[in-house]
Amino acid sequence: MIILGIDPGTVKCGYGIISKDENRRENLGYGVIYVPSNLEMPNKLAFIYNEIDNVIRQYHPEECAVETAFYGKNIQSALKLGYARGTAIIASIRSGLMVSEYSPKEVKKSVTGKGNASKEQVNFMVKTLLNLGGKDIPLDASDALAIALCASFQTDTKDKKPRSWTEFVKQNPKIISG
């Protein structure tokens, strides 16, 4: 299974792609989408959408894992993060991907064992888990890889509790079709 992890943002949006075969995880690619600062918000979202769509077309993932919004003090930042999350989710759903969501605490705990780990600790563990050695991985990209890893550590889709409406619909087609 190929999993796309997305660390959403309207300035920088990290992405990471891994493959999962039983207990083996392998890095397929990662990067950071740098959103031009001179764009108005609707155009920033279109830019993010197009870039995520390009990543999906290049790697053909089956699942997209997105980090949920954190609760900060700045409402404008939270709203912008919500826009970026929504854009990533729509791009994924339109490509037919199953979408799952994980909190920052869940992601950190799944790769480091600590829900309050620093970005640097997450970066170190991502490199360790994916055998990336001394590579210099941007923090936004390592966060996205951590999100993909978090999704990969969950039990098989048929056994896990739905984490999103997309999963619920896929797991319960008879309920939805009426």
Image: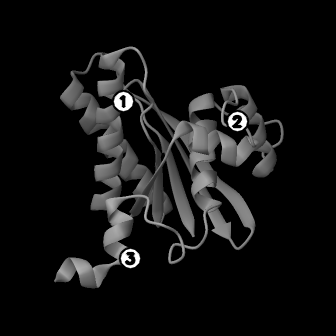
Identify the residue at image location x=34%, y=50%: 89
Q: In this view, does 175 lie to the left or right of 64?
A: left
Instruction: Please name which of the two marks, 3 or 2, marks the residue nearer to the observer.
Output: 3
Dot 1: what SS?
helix
Q: Which amino acid does label 1 sit on?
A: Leu
Above or below — where is 53 with respect to 168?
Answer: above
Secondary structure under the numbered disc 3 in the rendered image: helix
- Name the quadrant of the N terminus: bottom right
The numbered mark, 2 or 1, whose residue comes first in the sequence reads 1
Q: Which residue is drawn at 63% across and 30% down?
A: 138
Circle 1 residues within 10 Å: few <14, some 14–19, many ≥20: many
Amino acid at the residue labelled 3: Gln
At horizontal 36% and vertical 20% (from top left) the residue drawn is 77
> Tag 2: residue type?
Val
> Residue 142's spot in the image, x, y percent?
63, 38
| 141 relative to 21 in the view: left or right | left
The mark total stands at: 3
Would you name the residue on which mark 3 appears? 171
x and y percent of residue 8 in the render?
A: 43, 36
Disc 2 secondary structure class = helix
What colour scheme was applied to this rendering of the protein? Answer: one colour
User: Which is nearer the N-term, disc 3 or disc 2?
Assistant: 2
Q: Mark 1 points at which residue?
A: 81
Q: Which residue is drawn at 56% across and 42% down?
A: 144
Residue 102, horizontal then vertical, whole percent: 50, 47
Classed neighbour count for the residue bearing mark 3: other residues with Cα under 10 Å, few (<14), some (14–19), many (≥20): some
Q: Quadrant of the C terminus?
A: bottom left
162 with respect to 83 (left or right): right
Identify the disc placed on residue 122: 2
